[in-house]
Amino acid sequence: MDTDVLVVGAGPTGMTLANELRVAGVATVLVDKLPRRSELSRAGGVQSRTQEAFDQRGLLEPLLATGDHPVGSAHFAGIPLPLTRGRHRLPWRSIPQVVIEGFLEQHLAAHDIHVRRDHELVDLAQDENGVTATFANGARVHGRYLVAADGAHSTVRSLLRAEFPGQAGTVTAVAADVRLRCDDQAMTHSWNAEGHWAHMFPLGTDPQGRPLRRLAMGGPGRSLPRDVPVTEDEIRNGLRDIFGSRVELLELRYARRITNAARQVAQYRHGRVFLTGDAAHVHLPLGAQGMNTGIQDALNLGWKLGAAVHGWAPDELLDTYHGERHPVGAAVLRNVQAQSLLMDWEGTRDPSVAAARELFATMAQLRDVQCQLDDMLSGMGIRYPMPGTEDQSLVGLPSPDLRLGPVRLHELLRSGRGILLDPADRFAKVAHLWSDRVDRTGQGTDGRPMLIRPDGYVCWAGGPDGPEPALGHWFGEPR
């Protein structure tokens, strides 16, 4: 056995998973087909729940210290959601994917986990004991488990012949990182009468401290094949059509064409192989959903693989990865497709679409509607199904970051272990039986006991049967 877990793909999802496995004490090999880390920004927004995940591992503060990462404003299909400001301790921030990848790679290297580059997967075979991966450079790696984090064109997914149903891309638009002269710095979403559109948000600064923006633009006649290069003239002409002289291109740093494809694999688990991130689900990059969903896939899967490797995972624990994350991925596809429709992403100028958007924008002025959309986009509203605990309002949701004496709850989660909050000191004997995988603390704020999984989700919150059933369900047989 070369390793416990082989992770294929060293983007944000793969490196987050490698760190989760490191925290769990699991031997990990991380490979990527590229000879060097990409310098392309790709994604740019980090949602509240993703920041909480980084905070739970002690990564958020050093990540934010890497540069200027401004707080953004929530929106749905370009419709502002101003009433959601301040709802979460960690608001949406603009942190380019290239920054996250560089930060995570350095963090892993500091813990002696180095990306093995120039490893292009060409074959894999699995049996009851593990998975063997073969690479174009002649290398072979055998692990107990393999995780695909190799992106939208996943080789692992192809080799598995995994079902990947959904909608094929029908049109393209341009996504670019740019420096602009812009009269209105608050400008974000704009359309013109012909159906051409542009969306912009801040992307931090370049090495000289000059503001950068992520620009997306499209509309009638702007859908070109994905392999056609995006030129400066194309960007300038698009900006002129939509903004006139109010916006001027100063520098084009990076550009690509994106499609409206929306697909999701039917199964996230194939024996000892698991699909995560864009290998499991692809969609338009709207509302900062893709990278965040992938990182949260990794957060969900990492501790479960750790439990399996260490031998205490309950029989069905690894299956809960699909059971919990597949519905989340499906919901993300639906919300992105709804945003695409309401934005008239294809530039159809369909009066019915305009009417639907006008009605939706009116409804979105209501606070309850804004909060519902915010919970969906931020990931803070994700609630995993946990049968038998339906009457416990916190169960299945991310744990609140309670102040527990001198520390916060999220700081306690940095151990990668479960946490049992026992403010009345009732469960010491019970907790001792699981003390090799669950920590108990007797300090609470509101007197309510809770059991929190290593990924930060509440799995018991003071039910009448005590924590024993939940401890057994999520943490296996006691020692």
Image: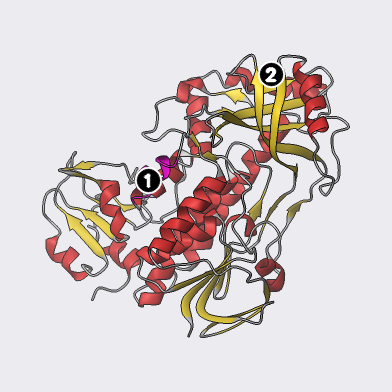
Q: Mark 1 to mark 2: distance in Å?
A: 42 Å
Q: Nearer the viewer, residue 291 or 305?
A: 291
> Is 396 positioned to the left or the right of 75 in the image?
left
Secondary structure under the numbered disc 1 in the rendered image: helix
Which amino acid type is marked by label 1? Pro
Instruction: Name the image quarter holding residue 109.
Output: bottom left
**Residue 370 image offset from top left, x and y in percent:** 51, 26
Q: Nearer the viewer, residue 29 or 295?
A: 29
Residue at left 74%, top 17%? 243
The residue indicated by pointer 1 is 62
> Image height check: is 146 above or below 459?
below
The residue indicated by pointer 2 is 358
**Residue 435 image offset from top left, x and y in percent:** 20, 67
> Is 276 positioned to the left or the right of 105 in the image?
right
Q: Which residues are magenta?
A: 58-66
Which amino acid type is marked by label 2? Glu
Crowding at dot 1, Cα within 10 Å, few <14 / some 14-19 / many 20+, comes out as few
Q: Note whether residue 397 is visible.
A: no
